[in-house]
Amino acid sequence: MPALDTFPPLRAWQRKALVEYLRRRTEDFTAVATPGAGKTTFALRIAAELLADGTVEAVTVVAPTEHLKTQWAQAAARVGIQLDAAFRNADLHSAADFHGAVVTYAQVGMAPQVHRRRTMTRRTLVILDEIHHAGDSRTWGDGVKAAFEPAVRRLMLTGTPFRSDDNPIPFVSYERGGDGLLRSRADSVYGYSDALREGVVRPVLFLAYSGETRWRTNAGEELAARLGEPMTQDLIAQAWRTALDPAGDWMPQVLRAADARLSVLRDNGMPDAGGLVIASDQQVARAYAKLLEQVTGEKAAVVLSDDQGASARIATFAASQQRWLVAVRMVSEGVDIPRLAVGVYATSASTPLYFAQAIGRFVRARRPGETASVFLPSVPHLLGLASEMEAERDHVLGKPKDREGFDDDLLERAQRDDGASGELEKRFAALSATAELDQVIFDGASFGTAAQAGTPEEEEYLGLPGLLTADQVSLLLTKRQAEQLAAQKRRAAQRTAEPAAAAPAAAPPPMSAAQRRVALRRQLNALVAARHHHTGQPHGKIHAELRRICGGPPSAQATIEQLEERIATVQTL
């Protein structure tokens, strides 16, 4: 039996949830905890308790991917619980020297009767890791339910307890709300805001890059658009895809900025800090790796598929000092590489679920003060997700579903000129894209003004210290923004003072809509910061309250009218 005294000390949320679990002693228990909070340690401590007191004789862990099977088995072995990560459905039973096995949802879905027999043979605790995956298909959900109904105990874990479909998640409780809709209910919840306040996870700075993009359709039509500007979904998707083209200038400029940020972290308290580029497909991932080699002079590790070789490459990177890893989706969920501190979100997938899982790779704190930086395109939907890092979502059944973000299929369709005549699809060709730092998003607030890549203004933000608390990040960003504005005013005053002796200064040209939005965002952030110092409320909570009163999206993607309304509202609070 595993020795309980060999376990690492539990965090406060883990102790509280463990006490609640042992008090209830119910068959099913759902624990929601933000990525990086320590769900694995919590689950293994429960397994050890139940094995020690004889409640169960065996443990089965169900994970989303093959790589996570290995990761679970290694974590369990460190605390004296032996799990068979090589178990296959054809084996029928694990060897007697294992406490149980680790399998994937796909394995269970293919042969639920095999796992049902295993569950019935011995009193079993089933740990369902990232349980929302059991709703990925009816086959998986039905398989999980059939296989593990006989279990003595079931522990459901997730960091993202929501889905955008109506597939119910097996063994999760749903409660009907006042609106008549069913919502998932967790027995223990530990959100990102709680973890950030207690120093369990890192503060995440989002550096959003806009820029001019141009592309041409096969019909010869040439189009241009600026990332971050209000556009139709089709135009946003095409501009976004053009920016991510490895042959353009946008990705090299952003990768250069991300690597500069990584160097700052390595030189100031995080000597082994690593970076991750999340790509949309294998071909583009290889191209990004070549760009990184040109920028850094060092080869980047590349992980393209969920196989044994990929697991070994991830493990090698995690234990090395190598600067960059390029991956396609595989490293987006559950994979534990604590030294990852800089990310480049260069994928077209942007559902709330996928975004939360991807950002979860960077928030795992090792010691107080570490920060994470994620570079992303200045796309309204992504900016909204970045501003809502602390939002807690539930799985809702029966609610009309709005399209959430752009998945790869939507972007593929958006690249086509769909004619009523049904003629052949006409794909566009990316022509050019340039990058500039549009804004920095932290704690729901937007900081900074537009800065061209490679300028001192950009370097001011890339050079932020790597070891800061969340409060220090807010304070420093506010200070940097104030300095930036003061410098702009001084330059403007100098320009108007020079011709003043000869002739009266001309009236300043009218601001564009983009300039007005930037100015209003700055004004709103200044007022929110003033209220924060007056009341002690976090910036994010003040922004959330303004959104509740006024409606509309986060300030990073709010309209001019919405920003003006919030400015008027915060002045009356």
Image (tube, rainbow, N blue to C red):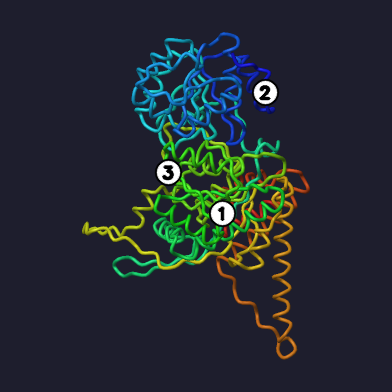
Q: Horizontal and vertical percent for residue 189? A: 60, 29
Quadrant for the N terminus in the image? top right
- Residue 402: mark: 3
Mark 3–mark 1 Cα distance, whole angstroms, equals: 26 Å
Q: Residues within 10 Å of mark 1 (few under 14, many from 20)?
A: many
Asked if the residues shown at circle 2 and circle 3 are in contact, with their CB atoms under 8 angstroms apart, the answer is: no
Type of residue at label 2? Arg
Q: Is residue 355 above or below residue 440?
A: above
Type of residue at label 3? Asp
Q: Is residue 335 above or below residue 41?
A: below
Q: Give whichever of discs 2 and 1 has the lower sequence position.
A: 2
Asked if the residues shown at circle 2 and circle 1 are in contact, with their CB atoms under 8 angstroms apart, the answer is: no
Q: Is residue 402 above or below residue 523?
A: above
In the picture as drawn, the residue positioned furthest to the bottom comes out as 502
Mark 2–mark 1 Cα distance, whole angstroms, equals: 35 Å
Q: Which residue is mark 1?
A: 375
Q: Residues within 10 Å of mark 3 (few under 14, many from 20)?
A: few
Type of residue at label 1? Phe
